[in-house]
Amino acid sequence: MLSLVSRVSPSDPNFAIELVQRCLASAVEQNASDVHLHPRSDRWDISFRIDGVLQDIESVPRSEDSDPVARLMALAGLPSYRNSVPQEGPLRFRLPDGNVREMRLGVFPTVHGNRAAIRIMDHREGIRQLNELGFDSQTHDRLQTICDARDGWLLVAGPAGSGKTTTLYACLSHIANCDFRRSVLTIEDPIESVIDSISQSQLQSSSGLTLAAAMRAAVRQDAEVLLVSEIRDVETAEVVLAASMTGHLCFSSIHAGTLGGTLRRLVQMNLPTFAIQSGLRGVLCQRLLRRRCDACQSQSSPPKTSSCDQCHGTGYRGRIPIAELVDLQNSHVGPQVFQALVQQAPASELDRLLANSGIESMQTQAEHLVERGITDREEVFRVLGRNA
């Protein structure tokens, strides 16, 4: 268990205010990406997601007179009378030092009341560049080639928390900083970091505007590079694919497990295979592995009961990416992959074709990191499962 949030007495009339303040401040201090508040019959369970793993922080007794989730909803401007439906909204939180952090609140009704999940937006002094992402040289070079293209579609795939947005922002930053100036426009929900030299737009839930509708309007803004934060439905996929075939370089993220799985998802969305072949330039599938804590490196395995103040006793601190990237337009394997799609080959067959083309698998990359002592097999199994 990590260091506890400072305890607040439920009898205190400012219980909810103090709990929210101390909880969010502690989460930011510990570099957490998410905060969970789970209502139980007699208590609140608080968890932080740090380096991709949910850590139990503290349990505090419930008070009938004060609800921390209601306090969060008030801060986010969400109506308290709609307790029976899920809600989302932006949240700006002022830290004790006066700095303000952007967050995203999600509220979901449960049998014991509303639970809350707060996403803490990334807050760096600067957006990472392509060479700062930690990819191997082959993946870096392929990614830069795609960023330097004038049309096509790059899909960045992986589960939630796998670093997709960080990679997409690095791509846009590379394009924005090139000598050859291009007009860049993004449609995001929400905006996680601001790049001053491009135009970023955040969807407003109250407007009723969908990603697909916003994308259709963006095409008429004379933008050469377009980003849609996530492919969530068939309509959005169709609009982005069409834009990639009409002289736009497009970037998006998608929830998928492998390169082959990503391609199969596009087919399952009823996108014509010939259109995918014409517009899709590349697919990048990535994961994040936790690094072994430098302060605990002398241990043969991560110490689970360590009092190390660097890693809070987890044995890990920081993360490193592993990724597979295929450039379907500049690769001999592209025609084979699309032929397999026409023949309705399963995702596993597509992944086999790509592996045989010389793309180093994430499993192999993870094994190299284990051999170098950067991570361990337990962490690889946690991220890649039985495939590892």
Image (cartoon, grey):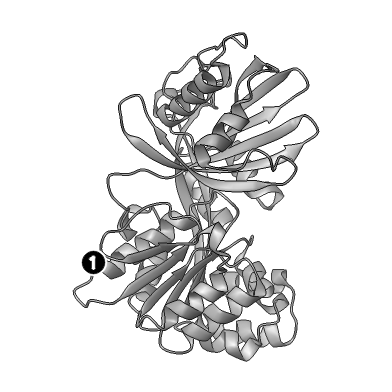
Left or right: 186 in relation to 126 = right
Residue at 40 percent of width and 66 percent of height: 138
When the figure is inspected, residue 123 is found, relative to residue 4, above or below; the finding is below
Q: Which residue is mark 1?
A: 177
Looking at the image, which residue sits at the far right?
Answer: 111
**Residue 183 rendering spot, x and y as whole percentages:** 30, 76
The residue sitting at the left extreme is 179
> In the displayed structure, would residue 239 be above or below residue 211?
below
Q: Is residue 361 visible?
A: no
Q: Give the residue at x 41% y 67%.
A: 186
Residue 106 lies, in percent from the top left, at: 60, 43
Amino acid type, mark 1:
Asn
Residue 283 position within the rendered picture, expressed as x and y whole percent measured from the top left: 52, 71
Q: Is 202 positioned to the left or the right of 380 in the image?
A: left
Quarter of the figure with residue 308: top left
Instruction: Tell me if residue 265 can be seen.
Output: yes
Q: Quadrant of the N terminus?
A: top right
Q: Nearer the viewer, residue 245 or 342?
A: 245
Residue 338: x %, y % from top left: 62, 85
Which residue lies at the image location 56% right of the left edge and 58% below the top edge? 205
Q: Is residue 160 left or right of residue 146?
A: right
Residue 140, by quadrant, is bottom left
Q: Which of 70/336 is in front?
A: 70
Q: Nearer the viewer, residue 152 or 357?
A: 152
Q: Residues within 10 Å of mark 1 (few under 14, many from 20)?
A: few
